Image: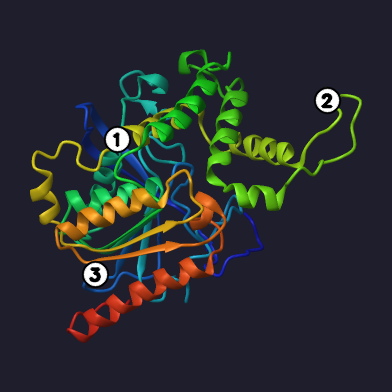
Amino acid sequence: MVKKYYSDVGFVSTQTVRLPGFETTFGYQFPYVDINYLTLGNLNKEKNNVILVTHALSGNALVAGQDKETGAIGWWDDYVGPNKAIDTNRFFVICSNVIGGCNGSTGPTSINPKTNRPYNMEFPPITIQDMVKAQSLLLEYLGIEKIFAVIGGSMGGMQALTWALHYPEKVHLCIPIATCMAHSAMQIAFNEVGRQAIMSDPNWNQGNYTPDKRPEHGLAVARMIGHITYLSAEIMEKKFGRKPQRNPEPSDIFPIFFSVESYLQYQGESFVKRFDPNSYLYITKALDMFDWFQNIENPDVAIRNIKSKFLVISFQSDWLYPPEQSRQIVKLLKRANKSVTYMNLNTPYGHDSFLIPNKELSTIIDSFLDLEFNQLTKNGVNLNAI
Protein backbone atom coordinates (compact mmCIF):
# COMPACT_ATOMS: atom_id res chain seq x y z
CA MET A 1 0.00 0.00 0.00
CA VAL A 2 1.21 3.51 -0.85
CA LYS A 3 1.81 5.43 2.39
CA LYS A 4 2.26 8.99 1.17
CA TYR A 5 -0.56 10.83 -0.55
CA TYR A 6 -0.63 13.91 -2.73
CA SER A 7 -4.35 14.59 -3.03
CA ASP A 8 -6.70 16.70 -0.92
CA VAL A 9 -9.20 13.87 -1.25
CA GLY A 10 -6.81 11.38 0.34
CA PHE A 11 -6.67 7.66 -0.31
CA VAL A 12 -9.52 6.08 -2.25
CA SER A 13 -10.49 2.67 -3.59
CA THR A 14 -12.81 1.86 -6.46
CA GLN A 15 -15.50 -0.82 -6.16
CA THR A 16 -16.90 -3.27 -8.67
CA VAL A 17 -20.52 -4.39 -8.87
CA ARG A 18 -21.90 -7.19 -11.04
CA LEU A 19 -25.24 -6.24 -12.61
CA PRO A 20 -27.35 -9.01 -14.19
CA GLY A 21 -28.79 -8.87 -17.68
CA PHE A 22 -27.65 -6.24 -20.16
CA GLU A 23 -28.61 -5.81 -23.82
CA THR A 24 -26.51 -3.58 -26.05
CA THR A 25 -27.74 -1.17 -28.71
CA PHE A 26 -26.97 -3.77 -31.37
CA GLY A 27 -28.81 -6.53 -29.52
CA TYR A 28 -26.03 -8.49 -27.82
CA GLN A 29 -27.18 -10.09 -24.56
CA PHE A 30 -24.67 -10.05 -21.71
CA PRO A 31 -25.64 -12.39 -18.85
CA TYR A 32 -24.10 -9.74 -16.59
CA VAL A 33 -21.77 -6.74 -16.72
CA ASP A 34 -19.21 -5.63 -14.16
CA ILE A 35 -19.04 -1.90 -13.43
CA ASN A 36 -16.05 -0.44 -11.64
CA TYR A 37 -16.87 2.83 -9.88
CA LEU A 38 -15.77 5.35 -7.29
CA THR A 39 -17.88 7.46 -4.94
CA LEU A 40 -16.69 10.55 -3.07
CA GLY A 41 -18.47 12.71 -0.50
CA ASN A 42 -21.70 11.88 1.31
CA LEU A 43 -25.07 11.01 -0.15
CA ASN A 44 -27.79 12.98 1.61
CA LYS A 45 -31.07 11.53 2.91
CA GLU A 46 -32.99 12.72 -0.14
CA LYS A 47 -30.33 11.25 -2.45
CA ASN A 48 -30.51 14.40 -4.57
CA ASN A 49 -26.98 15.82 -4.21
CA VAL A 50 -25.45 13.49 -6.80
CA ILE A 51 -22.99 14.60 -9.47
CA LEU A 52 -22.08 12.01 -12.09
CA VAL A 53 -18.70 12.63 -13.72
CA THR A 54 -18.22 10.85 -17.05
CA HIS A 55 -14.73 10.20 -18.35
CA ALA A 56 -13.04 10.59 -21.73
CA LEU A 57 -11.39 7.96 -23.95
CA SER A 58 -8.44 7.03 -21.73
CA GLY A 59 -10.08 7.79 -18.38
CA ASN A 60 -11.40 5.49 -15.67
CA ALA A 61 -13.35 5.53 -12.41
CA LEU A 62 -10.47 7.15 -10.49
CA VAL A 63 -11.74 10.70 -10.94
CA ALA A 64 -10.04 12.12 -7.83
CA GLY A 65 -8.01 11.07 -4.82
CA GLN A 66 -5.09 8.69 -4.69
CA ASP A 67 -5.47 4.98 -5.29
CA LYS A 68 -4.49 3.08 -2.14
CA GLU A 69 -2.67 0.36 -4.00
CA THR A 70 -1.07 1.97 -7.03
CA GLY A 71 -0.59 5.53 -5.80
CA ALA A 72 -2.17 6.88 -9.00
CA ILE A 73 -3.80 10.31 -8.72
CA GLY A 74 -7.31 10.80 -10.07
CA TRP A 75 -7.47 12.23 -13.58
CA TRP A 76 -9.68 15.18 -12.44
CA ASP A 77 -8.19 15.68 -9.00
CA ASP A 78 -7.78 19.40 -9.68
CA TYR A 79 -11.54 19.80 -10.05
CA VAL A 80 -13.10 17.27 -7.66
CA GLY A 81 -12.60 17.35 -3.91
CA PRO A 82 -13.19 19.41 -0.76
CA ASN A 83 -13.83 23.07 -1.65
CA LYS A 84 -12.99 22.49 -5.32
CA ALA A 85 -15.21 23.21 -8.32
CA ILE A 86 -17.07 19.95 -7.70
CA ASP A 87 -17.13 20.17 -3.93
CA THR A 88 -17.23 16.81 -2.16
CA ASN A 89 -18.22 18.61 1.06
CA ARG A 90 -21.47 19.41 -0.72
CA PHE A 91 -21.96 16.79 -3.43
CA PHE A 92 -21.91 13.00 -3.67
CA VAL A 93 -19.70 12.34 -6.70
CA ILE A 94 -19.86 9.15 -8.76
CA CYS A 95 -17.59 8.13 -11.61
CA SER A 96 -17.58 4.73 -13.30
CA ASN A 97 -15.33 3.08 -15.85
CA VAL A 98 -17.24 2.67 -19.14
CA ILE A 99 -18.16 -0.76 -20.48
CA GLY A 100 -15.70 -1.64 -23.20
CA GLY A 101 -12.95 -0.25 -20.98
CA CYS A 102 -10.04 -2.02 -19.33
CA ASN A 103 -10.13 -0.73 -15.77
CA GLY A 104 -12.52 -3.08 -14.01
CA SER A 105 -15.68 -2.75 -16.09
CA THR A 106 -16.69 -5.40 -18.60
CA GLY A 107 -14.60 -5.08 -21.76
CA PRO A 108 -12.57 -7.10 -24.28
CA THR A 109 -10.16 -8.32 -21.56
CA SER A 110 -13.02 -9.69 -19.43
CA ILE A 111 -13.76 -13.40 -19.30
CA ASN A 112 -16.56 -14.49 -21.59
CA PRO A 113 -18.69 -16.85 -19.44
CA LYS A 114 -19.64 -18.81 -22.57
CA THR A 115 -16.04 -19.73 -23.40
CA ASN A 116 -14.13 -19.17 -20.14
CA ARG A 117 -11.63 -17.12 -22.16
CA PRO A 118 -11.21 -13.37 -22.64
CA TYR A 119 -13.71 -11.90 -25.06
CA ASN A 120 -11.00 -10.25 -27.19
CA MET A 121 -12.61 -9.47 -30.57
CA GLU A 122 -15.67 -11.56 -29.71
CA PHE A 123 -16.67 -8.63 -27.56
CA PRO A 124 -19.71 -6.97 -29.16
CA PRO A 125 -19.65 -3.44 -30.60
CA ILE A 126 -20.65 -0.96 -27.89
CA THR A 127 -22.01 2.57 -28.11
CA ILE A 128 -22.08 5.70 -25.99
CA GLN A 129 -25.72 4.82 -25.27
CA ASP A 130 -24.56 1.47 -23.88
CA MET A 131 -22.08 3.22 -21.59
CA VAL A 132 -24.83 5.48 -20.26
CA LYS A 133 -27.27 2.59 -19.88
CA ALA A 134 -24.70 0.81 -17.69
CA GLN A 135 -24.33 3.98 -15.59
CA SER A 136 -28.10 4.19 -15.17
CA LEU A 137 -28.16 0.60 -13.90
CA LEU A 138 -25.36 1.46 -11.47
CA LEU A 139 -27.36 4.41 -10.11
CA GLU A 140 -30.41 2.17 -9.83
CA TYR A 141 -28.30 -0.30 -7.84
CA LEU A 142 -27.22 2.56 -5.54
CA GLY A 143 -30.84 3.62 -5.07
CA ILE A 144 -30.37 6.97 -6.83
CA GLU A 145 -33.29 8.19 -8.94
CA LYS A 146 -32.08 11.64 -10.01
CA ILE A 147 -28.78 13.38 -10.73
CA PHE A 148 -28.18 16.97 -9.69
CA ALA A 149 -25.60 17.26 -12.48
CA VAL A 150 -23.84 15.15 -15.07
CA ILE A 151 -20.55 16.53 -16.34
CA GLY A 152 -17.86 15.31 -18.70
CA GLY A 153 -15.42 16.35 -21.40
CA SER A 154 -14.87 14.91 -24.89
CA MET A 155 -16.33 11.38 -24.79
CA GLY A 156 -17.59 12.28 -21.33
CA GLY A 157 -19.50 15.16 -22.90
CA MET A 158 -21.17 12.73 -25.30
CA GLN A 159 -22.28 10.69 -22.30
CA ALA A 160 -23.61 13.80 -20.57
CA LEU A 161 -25.63 14.74 -23.65
CA THR A 162 -26.99 11.19 -23.86
CA TRP A 163 -28.09 11.33 -20.24
CA ALA A 164 -30.04 14.56 -20.85
CA LEU A 165 -31.74 13.20 -23.98
CA HIS A 166 -32.49 9.60 -22.98
CA TYR A 167 -33.14 10.10 -19.25
CA PRO A 168 -34.78 13.56 -19.21
CA GLU A 169 -36.55 13.05 -15.87
CA LYS A 170 -33.33 12.10 -14.09
CA VAL A 171 -30.97 14.97 -14.94
CA HIS A 172 -31.21 18.49 -13.50
CA LEU A 173 -28.00 20.01 -14.91
CA CYS A 174 -25.97 18.90 -17.92
CA ILE A 175 -22.41 20.15 -18.48
CA PRO A 176 -20.86 18.87 -21.74
CA ILE A 177 -17.31 20.11 -22.29
CA ALA A 178 -15.33 20.13 -25.56
CA THR A 179 -17.61 17.67 -27.30
CA CYS A 180 -20.00 17.28 -30.23
CA MET A 181 -23.29 15.78 -31.38
CA ALA A 182 -21.53 13.52 -33.89
CA HIS A 183 -17.98 13.05 -35.14
CA SER A 184 -16.87 14.80 -38.31
CA ALA A 185 -15.04 12.96 -41.09
CA MET A 186 -11.73 14.34 -39.78
CA GLN A 187 -12.38 13.10 -36.25
CA ILE A 188 -13.23 9.65 -37.57
CA ALA A 189 -10.12 9.72 -39.76
CA PHE A 190 -7.74 10.32 -36.85
CA ASN A 191 -9.31 7.46 -34.90
CA GLU A 192 -9.12 5.12 -37.88
CA VAL A 193 -5.39 5.79 -38.30
CA GLY A 194 -4.94 4.88 -34.63
CA ARG A 195 -6.95 1.69 -35.04
CA GLN A 196 -4.95 0.70 -38.12
CA ALA A 197 -1.70 1.26 -36.20
CA ILE A 198 -2.85 -1.30 -33.64
CA MET A 199 -4.25 -3.82 -36.11
CA SER A 200 -1.12 -3.58 -38.28
CA ASP A 201 1.10 -4.54 -35.35
CA PRO A 202 2.16 -8.21 -35.87
CA ASN A 203 1.46 -8.89 -32.20
CA TRP A 204 -2.22 -7.93 -32.55
CA ASN A 205 -2.98 -11.39 -33.97
CA GLN A 206 -6.62 -10.57 -34.85
CA GLY A 207 -7.07 -9.38 -31.28
CA ASN A 208 -5.97 -12.69 -29.75
CA TYR A 209 -2.73 -11.45 -28.23
CA THR A 210 -1.39 -12.63 -24.88
CA PRO A 211 -0.37 -10.47 -21.88
CA ASP A 212 3.31 -11.10 -22.62
CA LYS A 213 3.01 -10.38 -26.36
CA ARG A 214 0.73 -7.37 -26.83
CA PRO A 215 0.65 -4.99 -29.82
CA GLU A 216 2.34 -2.33 -27.74
CA HIS A 217 4.09 -0.60 -30.61
CA GLY A 218 0.80 -0.14 -32.48
CA LEU A 219 -0.97 1.16 -29.37
CA ALA A 220 1.89 3.55 -28.65
CA VAL A 221 1.69 4.96 -32.19
CA ALA A 222 -2.09 5.30 -31.85
CA ARG A 223 -1.60 7.26 -28.63
CA MET A 224 1.05 9.46 -30.23
CA ILE A 225 -1.33 10.32 -33.07
CA GLY A 226 -4.12 11.04 -30.61
CA HIS A 227 -1.92 13.16 -28.37
CA ILE A 228 -0.98 15.45 -31.25
CA THR A 229 -4.68 16.23 -31.72
CA TYR A 230 -5.13 17.01 -28.02
CA LEU A 231 -2.64 19.90 -28.09
CA SER A 232 -2.74 23.22 -29.92
CA ALA A 233 -0.10 24.43 -32.39
CA GLU A 234 0.59 27.36 -30.06
CA ILE A 235 1.34 25.23 -27.03
CA MET A 236 3.37 22.73 -29.08
CA GLU A 237 5.56 25.54 -30.38
CA LYS A 238 5.88 27.16 -26.97
CA LYS A 239 6.66 23.91 -25.18
CA PHE A 240 8.93 22.27 -27.75
CA GLY A 241 9.66 24.41 -30.79
CA ARG A 242 12.61 22.93 -32.63
CA LYS A 243 14.63 22.20 -29.51
CA PRO A 244 16.81 19.09 -29.68
CA GLN A 245 16.31 16.66 -26.80
CA ARG A 246 19.96 15.64 -26.40
CA ASN A 247 23.25 15.23 -28.16
CA PRO A 248 23.40 12.51 -30.84
CA GLU A 249 24.07 8.97 -29.63
CA PRO A 250 25.80 6.19 -31.61
CA SER A 251 22.52 4.28 -31.95
CA ASP A 252 20.65 7.24 -33.48
CA ILE A 253 19.71 6.91 -37.15
CA PHE A 254 19.53 10.68 -37.65
CA PRO A 255 21.81 13.41 -36.26
CA ILE A 256 19.05 15.35 -34.48
CA PHE A 257 16.46 14.04 -31.98
CA PHE A 258 13.85 16.71 -31.30
CA SER A 259 12.27 17.37 -27.92
CA VAL A 260 8.77 16.89 -29.31
CA GLU A 261 9.76 13.45 -30.63
CA SER A 262 10.91 12.44 -27.17
CA TYR A 263 7.67 13.74 -25.63
CA LEU A 264 5.45 11.79 -28.01
CA GLN A 265 7.45 8.60 -27.53
CA TYR A 266 7.12 8.97 -23.77
CA GLN A 267 3.36 9.48 -24.06
CA GLY A 268 3.05 6.36 -26.19
CA GLU A 269 5.24 4.19 -23.97
CA SER A 270 3.51 5.23 -20.74
CA PHE A 271 0.04 4.70 -22.24
CA VAL A 272 0.63 1.06 -23.19
CA LYS A 273 1.33 0.25 -19.54
CA ARG A 274 -2.19 1.20 -18.47
CA PHE A 275 -4.46 0.57 -21.47
CA ASP A 276 -5.63 -2.38 -23.51
CA PRO A 277 -5.24 -2.26 -27.32
CA ASN A 278 -8.59 -3.94 -28.03
CA SER A 279 -10.35 -1.53 -25.67
CA TYR A 280 -8.83 1.29 -27.68
CA LEU A 281 -10.38 -0.15 -30.83
CA TYR A 282 -13.84 -0.55 -29.30
CA ILE A 283 -13.97 2.80 -27.54
CA THR A 284 -12.72 4.85 -30.48
CA LYS A 285 -15.29 3.11 -32.69
CA ALA A 286 -18.00 3.98 -30.14
CA LEU A 287 -16.87 7.61 -30.42
CA ASP A 288 -17.07 7.51 -34.21
CA MET A 289 -20.50 5.86 -34.22
CA PHE A 290 -21.96 8.36 -31.74
CA ASP A 291 -24.91 10.35 -32.99
CA TRP A 292 -26.86 12.25 -30.33
CA PHE A 293 -30.15 11.42 -32.06
CA GLN A 294 -29.34 7.82 -32.97
CA ASN A 295 -32.41 5.58 -32.57
CA ILE A 296 -34.59 8.61 -31.82
CA GLU A 297 -37.72 8.48 -34.00
CA ASN A 298 -38.62 12.17 -33.56
CA PRO A 299 -35.62 14.34 -32.56
CA ASP A 300 -37.76 17.50 -32.25
CA VAL A 301 -40.02 15.85 -29.69
CA ALA A 302 -37.08 14.29 -27.86
CA ILE A 303 -35.25 17.58 -27.47
CA ARG A 304 -38.42 19.33 -26.30
CA ASN A 305 -38.74 16.68 -23.60
CA ILE A 306 -35.31 17.50 -22.16
CA LYS A 307 -35.61 18.93 -18.66
CA SER A 308 -31.98 19.79 -17.97
CA LYS A 309 -30.38 23.19 -17.74
CA PHE A 310 -27.16 23.27 -19.73
CA LEU A 311 -23.69 24.71 -19.37
CA VAL A 312 -21.86 24.07 -22.65
CA ILE A 313 -18.11 24.77 -22.65
CA SER A 314 -15.62 24.83 -25.52
CA PHE A 315 -12.04 26.04 -26.00
CA GLN A 316 -10.96 28.40 -28.73
CA SER A 317 -7.66 26.54 -29.29
CA ASP A 318 -9.31 23.11 -29.53
CA TRP A 319 -9.03 22.03 -33.16
CA LEU A 320 -10.03 18.41 -32.51
CA TYR A 321 -13.45 19.36 -31.08
CA PRO A 322 -13.68 22.96 -32.35
CA PRO A 323 -16.02 25.51 -30.75
CA GLU A 324 -18.33 25.36 -33.76
CA GLN A 325 -19.41 21.88 -32.72
CA SER A 326 -20.37 23.14 -29.27
CA ARG A 327 -22.20 26.08 -30.80
CA GLN A 328 -24.25 23.64 -32.88
CA ILE A 329 -25.43 22.04 -29.63
CA VAL A 330 -26.23 25.45 -28.15
CA LYS A 331 -28.19 26.60 -31.21
CA LEU A 332 -30.25 23.41 -31.24
CA LEU A 333 -31.08 23.73 -27.54
CA LYS A 334 -31.92 27.41 -27.80
CA ARG A 335 -34.27 26.76 -30.71
CA ALA A 336 -36.08 24.34 -28.40
CA ASN A 337 -36.23 27.09 -25.72
CA LYS A 338 -33.96 25.24 -23.30
CA SER A 339 -31.95 26.99 -20.60
CA VAL A 340 -28.40 27.16 -21.98
CA THR A 341 -25.27 28.95 -20.84
CA TYR A 342 -22.39 28.82 -23.30
CA MET A 343 -18.75 29.63 -22.57
CA ASN A 344 -15.95 29.52 -25.13
CA LEU A 345 -12.71 29.84 -23.19
CA ASN A 346 -9.64 31.35 -24.79
CA THR A 347 -7.13 28.97 -23.23
CA PRO A 348 -4.10 27.95 -25.34
CA TYR A 349 -3.92 24.27 -24.43
CA GLY A 350 -6.16 22.77 -27.11
CA HIS A 351 -8.46 19.84 -26.38
CA ASP A 352 -6.51 19.03 -23.22
CA SER A 353 -7.74 22.30 -21.68
CA PHE A 354 -10.35 20.48 -19.60
CA LEU A 355 -7.90 17.92 -18.17
CA ILE A 356 -5.09 20.17 -16.99
CA PRO A 357 -5.33 22.71 -14.13
CA ASN A 358 -7.44 25.51 -15.60
CA LYS A 359 -8.55 28.20 -13.17
CA GLU A 360 -11.04 29.76 -15.58
CA LEU A 361 -12.76 26.44 -16.24
CA SER A 362 -12.81 25.60 -12.55
CA THR A 363 -14.39 28.96 -11.67
CA ILE A 364 -17.10 28.60 -14.32
CA ILE A 365 -18.09 25.09 -13.21
CA ASP A 366 -18.04 26.11 -9.55
CA SER A 367 -20.18 29.20 -10.20
CA PHE A 368 -22.74 27.32 -12.29
CA LEU A 369 -23.17 24.56 -9.71
CA ASP A 370 -23.23 27.03 -6.83
CA LEU A 371 -25.85 29.26 -8.47
CA GLU A 372 -28.23 26.35 -9.06
CA PHE A 373 -27.54 24.84 -5.64
CA ASN A 374 -28.43 28.13 -3.95
CA GLN A 375 -31.51 28.63 -6.14
CA LEU A 376 -32.90 25.20 -5.33
CA THR A 377 -32.11 25.66 -1.64
CA LYS A 378 -33.96 28.97 -1.67
CA ASN A 379 -36.94 27.15 -3.19
CA GLY A 380 -36.98 24.69 -0.32
CA VAL A 381 -35.03 21.79 -1.85
CA ASN A 382 -32.69 20.20 0.69
CA LEU A 383 -29.39 19.43 -1.04
CA ASN A 384 -27.13 19.45 2.00
CA ALA A 385 -24.77 16.51 2.23
CA ILE A 386 -25.81 15.14 5.62
**Residue 107 at x, y percent in the picture:** 39, 32
Q: Secondary structure at mark 3?
A: loop
Counting residues from the start of the chain, the first of labels 3 and 1 encountered is: 3
Foreground of the two, 17 or 306: 306
Q: How far apart, in angstroms, are the residues tagged by discs 2 and 1?
A: 43 Å
**Label 2 secondary element:** loop
| Earlier-in-chain disc, 3 versus 2 | 3
> Can you tell which quarter of the image residue 261 is in?
top right
| Residue of label 2 | 254
Provide residue 10's location: percent of width, then percent of height: 55, 66
Quarter that holds the C terminus: bottom left
Could you tell me the amino acid type at mark 3?
Asn
Q: Quadrant of residue 104?
A: top left
Q: Earlier in the sequence, mark 2 or mark 1?
A: 1
Quadrant position of the N terminus in the picture: bottom right
Pair 2/1: label in front:
2
Type of the residue with mark 1: Thr
Residue of label 1? 127
Mark 3 Cα shell of 10 Å, populated few (<14), some (14-19), many (≥20)? many
Relative to 62, does residue 217 appear above or below in the rendering? above
The answer to whether the residue labelled 3 contacts the one labelled 2, judged by CB atoms less than 8 Å apart, is: no
Q: State the image coordinates of residue 35 (x, y, percent, origin top left).
A: 35, 44
Question: Observer-nearest residue: 247 or 236?
Answer: 236
- Where does label 3 land, which residue? 48
Whole-number angstrom distance, CA of label 3 to CA of label 1? 28 Å
Would you say residue 53 is visible in this rendering? no
Left or right: 282 as drawn, with respect to 267: left
Determine which quarter of the picture holds residue 299. Answer: top left
Q: Residues within 10 Å of mark 2 (few under 14, many from 20)?
A: few
Residue 129 relative to residue 6: left or right: left
Q: Please name which of the two marks, 3 or 2, marks the residue nearer to the observer.
A: 2
Instruction: Tell me if residue 280 comes above or below residue 312 in the rendering.
Output: above
